[in-house]
């Protein structure tokens, strides 16, 4: 486990975004992944931040 944070993020991305959708084309995949990334980076509370969102 050389890159724990990256592996954790990749697993979360795979479980919550990539495995949940069937992508019809590359444009749709980019839109959904951008929406997921926006939610993850700005609106979702993180335990490493004591329950605050990165935005806060």
Image (cartoon, rainbow, N blue to C red):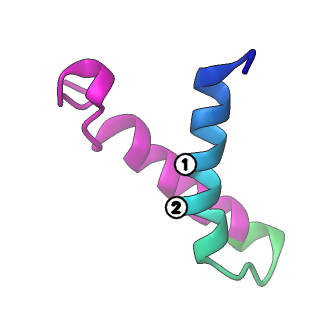
Circle 2 residue: 16
Badge 2: few (under 14), some or many (20 or more) residues near its Cα, within 10 Å? few
User: Does residue 10 lie above or below 5 as drawn?
Assistant: below
Stretch of the chain drawn in magenta: 29-56
List x then y, in percent, for residue 16: 52, 61
Q: Is residue 38 above or below residue 5?
A: below
Q: Residue furthest top?
A: 2
- Can residue 54 be seen by looking at this rendering? no
Q: Does residue 8 appear to the left or right of 1 in the view shown?
A: left
Q: Going 58% across and 75% down the picture, which residue do you hit?
A: 20
The answer to whether one can see residue 39 in this image is: yes
Q: Residue at x 75, y 15 (%)?
A: 2
Q: Are marks 2 and 1 in contact (CB under 8 Å)?
A: yes
- Where is mark 1, residue-wise? 12
**Label 2: element kind:** helix
Residue drawn at x 28%, y 43% as measured from the top left: 43
Residue 18 at x, y = what percent? 66, 65
Residue 42 within the segment the image draws in magenta = yes
Percent position (x, y) of residue 29? Answer: 71, 67
Q: Residue furthest right?
A: 26
Looking at the image, which is closer to me, 46 or 2?
2
Task: State the image quarter where residue 1 is shown.
Answer: top right
The location of residue 35, given as percent across then percent down, is: 49, 57
Q: How would you rate the neighbour count of disc 1 (Cα within 10 Å): few for under 14, some for 14-19, many for 20 or more?
A: few
Q: Is residue 5 above or below residue 22?
A: above
Q: Give yes or no for residue 49 being in the magenta stretch.
A: yes
């Amino acid at each position: 486990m050389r890159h724990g944070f990256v592996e954790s993020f990749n697993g979360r991305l795979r479980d919550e975004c990539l495995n949940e959708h069937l992508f019809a084309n590359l444009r749709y995949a980019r839109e959904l992944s951008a929406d997921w990334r926006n939610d993850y980076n700005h609106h979702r509370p993180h335990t490493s931040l004591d329950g605050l969102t990165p935005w806060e």
